[in-house]
Image (cartoon, helix red, strand yellow):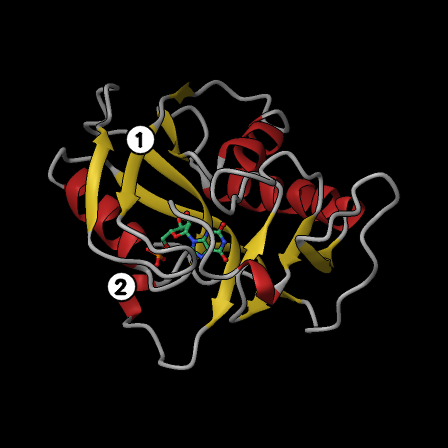
Amino acid sequence: MAKHHQIQSVSGILTPIPEGWESSDLEGMLISESKLQSRVKVLASEIANQLPSNEPVVVLPLLSGAFLFAADLVRQWQFEFELDFIGLSSYRTSTRSGPIEWIHRVKADIENKHVVIIDDILDTGQTLVEATKELSKLHPATIQTCVLLEKDVKNPRPLSCHANFVGFKIPDIFVVGYGLDFALKFRQLPFVGVISPNCYGTGTH
Ligand code: XMP
């Protein structure tokens, strides 16, 4: 497994929502579009540098939250790889994770190949642990994990819950945008924002 890569910290300070995207449901912006885009480029080259050249690679974005992040990330890679999607769903109330189940299993043959799992956010870590555990049974050569965001949760996660590549470390708050949703909304925001506290309890996943 690759060592934990450099993390770019973001403070808890929110900035105003960019013009045109304002909504009474949004409290503020946490990570701007330009910061996301420049970090994605760096992450893409960090991951590419870790992959052995001329060996088969399978990239597996997790549905649905990683779709925009993965789309931007993979378009940086000019080497050849297979792309498939996997889906895990945690039963959630509006903002809390619950038990997890597979909704889309891998179709690609990953045996003896280098697998890169791409997820939106590392919260409790149970999604990445389950994905890694199940995919290991298919005998890939290696599995690397990459998340756009890692929440700074109070209780430290076990080592097995860590991602190899992390875009930004963020405070333990519920975020939306750049693929992440609240009640299936806000995925299309080009930035990462924070929903207003008065929205909590009104959404379902
Ligand atoms: P964990 O690491 O707890 O994460 O297995 C499970 C999934 O929960 C979702 N999640 C969030 N979604 N804003 C979101 O829109 C958040 O702040 C957030 N925290 C967790 C996400 O889909 C993750 O893959």
Find residue 160 and report its horizontal and vertical position in percent: 26, 63
Q: Is residue 103 above or below residue 89?
A: above
The residue under label 1 is: 86
The residue under label 2 is: 160
What residue sits 17% from the left and 48% below the top? 133
N-term-proximal mark, 1 vs 2: 1
SS for callout 1: strand
Find residue 55 and report its horizontal and vertical position in percent: 37, 26
The label nearer to you, 1 versus 2, is 1
Give the residue type at disc 2. Answer: Ser
What residue sits 81% from the left and 63% below the top? 15
28 horizontally vs 43: left or right: right
188 horizontally vs 19: left or right: left
Find residue 3 and report its horizontal and vertical position in percent: 43, 61
Q: Residue 154 falls in which quadrant of the image?
A: bottom left
Work out whether residue 139 can be spotted: yes
Residue 1 - label: none
Q: Quadrant of the N terminus?
A: bottom left
Find residue 101 and report its horizontal and vertical position in percent: 19, 42
Disc 2 crowd rating (10 Å Cα; few below 14, some 14-19, many 20+) is few
Disc 1 crowd rating (10 Å Cα; few below 14, some 14-19, many 20+) is some
What residue sits 80% from the left and 52% below the top? 17
Q: Residue 140 falls in which quadrant of the image?
A: top left
133 horizontally vs 143: left or right: left
Give the residue type at disc 1. Answer: Ile
Q: Is residue 79 above or below residue 63?
A: above
